[in-house]
Amino acid sequence: MSDTTSLTPTRPYMVRALYQWIEDNALTPYLMVDATAKNVQVPTEHVQDGRIVLNIASRATGNMRIDNDYIQFSARFGGVSQEIWVPLTAVMGIYAKENSQGMFFDPNEYDNYVPEEQHTTSKADKPKPKRDNKAGLKVLK
């Protein structure tokens, strides 16, 4: 690939890896989120200076899903369960509460990135090549 804008951002992969590492070491993963970013769904009463830090430990969340485009889970705030939705573009960093080890991300990482479904020709538009229907086993000698 010669065009680096077609490469997927590393952020979702790093978030998943660090989340797993923090959990495996019995630490508490904290996610810092830009609460002013588009499509962020967090409890606004806990936002300070346009940011919110969320405890995303498995014991504090339900139905956690870290996809390449978003993080989604349910959590309780003041005893009330809420659905949290954080696009990966809004994730500023992930770190362990106990020792602050983790990673903060380049805010410009997504500037030139165009998701594959937004390219002019998506995979769904391209016809799949037909495969010969040659079922069966071959004997190799």
Image: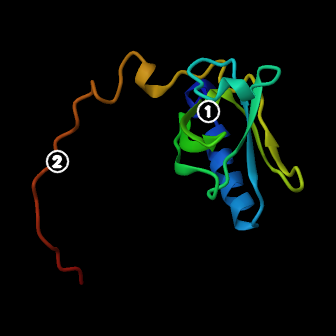
Image check: 100 left or right of 106?
Answer: right
In this rendering, does residue 27 appear at all?
A: yes
Crowd class of label 2 (few under 14; some 14 to 19; many from 20; radius 10 Å): few
Which numbered disc flags the more N-terminal residue, 1 or 2?
Answer: 1
Q: Nearer the viewer, mark 1 or mark 2?
A: 1
Label 1 with label 2: CB-CB less than 8 Å: no
- The front one of 17 and 7 is 17
Query: Amino acid type of disc 2?
Result: Arg
Q: Who's the residue at 58% across and 27% down the image?
A: 41
58 shown above or below 107: below
Query: Amino acid type of disc 1?
Result: Leu
Number of dots carrying numbers: 2
Looking at the rendered image, the quarter that the C terminus falls into is bottom left
134 shown above or below 47: below
In this rendering, does residue 34 appear at all?
A: no
| Residue 124 x %, y % | 29, 28
Q: Which residue is mark 2?
A: 131
Q: Who's the residue at 10% across and 54% down the image?
A: 133
Looking at the rendered image, the quarter that the N terminus falls into is top right
Image check: 38 left or right of 51?
Answer: left
Q: Helix or strand or loop: what does disc 1 sit on?
A: helix
- The front one of 50 and 45 is 45
Q: Which residue is mark 1?
A: 88
57 shown above or below 89: below
| Residue 28 x %, y % | 76, 56
Q: Helix or strand or loop: what does disc 2 sit on?
A: loop
